[in-house]
Image (spheres, helix red, strand yellow):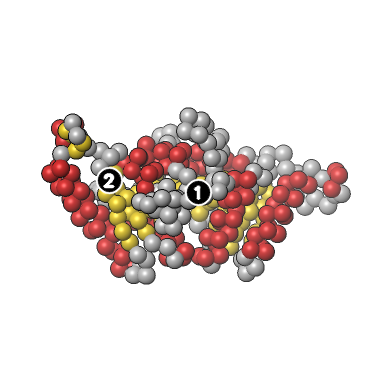
Amino acid sequence: MPPVVTVGLDGSPESLAAARWAAEEADRRKLALRLLHAWPTLAPEPVCLPAEVDQNYWAKRLVDTAQAELRARHPGLAIDKSLVADDAQHALLQAASESEMVVLGSRGLESVESYFLGDVSMPVVARAERPVVLVRAEPRKEQGPGTAAGRVVVALKLHGSPEDLLDFAFRTAAARDLPVLAVHGRSVPLHARTPWGVDHRFSEERTRDAHEQVSTALQPWREKYPQVDVADSIRLESPAKAVVQVAEGASLLVMGRRRHRAGLVPHLGPVAQAAVHHGRCPVAVVPHD
């Protein structure tokens, strides 16, 4: 199968927003786009029946309507339609193994409700072998100073960030002609806290040390993608809070997720959990060893 970006369609505004994002990404990367709609009761194809008795009519209409819109926006993009008689989660995980990435809609939920992100999206994010991008349908708000508007934000650890994560972030930034902002958050231990905040000497030393390590991690990617502007943001607060706050208004937030060994229950770490639940921009979760 040629390289393809797969998007899951269910007719919701979120899935249509995901389809638009996926089409733009596929077009920029010179890949094909696959529109996937899965439902266990879909009839086997081909079905040559009048609309009034075709049980696949609404599924076909959903995919056809999306295809027509995306072809109008991206005339040169190769778009494939796929109706699958299968559980959506299983179908998307299968598609992920065959795709460069899978793109899904993500509901814009309030913080208390956000832990019920969806019966399909979260298991796919946690188990897929390829990157999964979650896209919300809500309009973007105007951003104030200090935000990452118009950037690809990548969350970095200091003890080595996997190549898959940085490759995805820089490839996306290069394709979209956007700068990269690497963000690293580090919690402040109790002994460094004072009644008026964080000890100034500790703050300077910790920030300088983190900046040096982040710069070292980014240097090979600066050389590989010289056309991409790169900056970093070191924040002395919890990594989850730092990532969500810095990525406000970003074009994309890129997170890493460890692949799980056989027998273990797939799950996301706390930073990835915070990003997919509370991040307001598109969030890419990239699996790595």
Q: As displayed, is residue 172 above or below residue 259?
A: below
Q: Dot 1, crowdedness within 10 Å: few (<14), some or many (≥20)?
A: few
Amino acid beneath label 1: Lys
The residue identified by callout 1 is 141
Q: Nearer the viewer, residue 209 or 41?
A: 209
Q: As displayed, is residue 176 above or below residue 187?
A: below
- State the image coordinates of residue 195 (x, y, percent, origin top left): 18, 31
**Residue 235 shows which numbered tag?**
2
Residue 238 falls left or right of residue 97: left
Badge 1 element: loop
At horizontal 60% and vertical 53% (from top left) the residue drawn is 19
- State the image coordinates of residue 135 (x, y, percent, origin top left): 53, 48
Toward which corner of the image does residue 191 lie, by quadrant? top left
Q: As displayed, is residue 139 above or below residue 187?
A: below
Amino acid beneath label 2: Arg
At horizontal 62% and vertical 65% (from top left) the residue drawn is 74
Residue 211 falls left or right of residue 105: left
Q: Nearer the viewer, residue 201 or 63?
A: 201
Toward which corner of the image does residue 219 lie, by quadrant? bottom left
Residue 196 falls left or right of residue 79: left
Query: Closer to the observer: label 2 or label 1?
Result: 1
Could you give the CA–CA distance between mark 2 and mark 1, rounded to whole angstroms? 24 Å
At horizontal 62% and vertical 39% (from top left) the residue drawn is 87
Tag count in the figure? 2
At horizontal 24% and vertical 48% (from top left) the residue drawn is 159
- State the image coordinates of residue 12 (x, y, percent, origin top left): 64, 43
Badge 2 element: strand
| Residue 94 visible in this rendered orientation of the protein | no
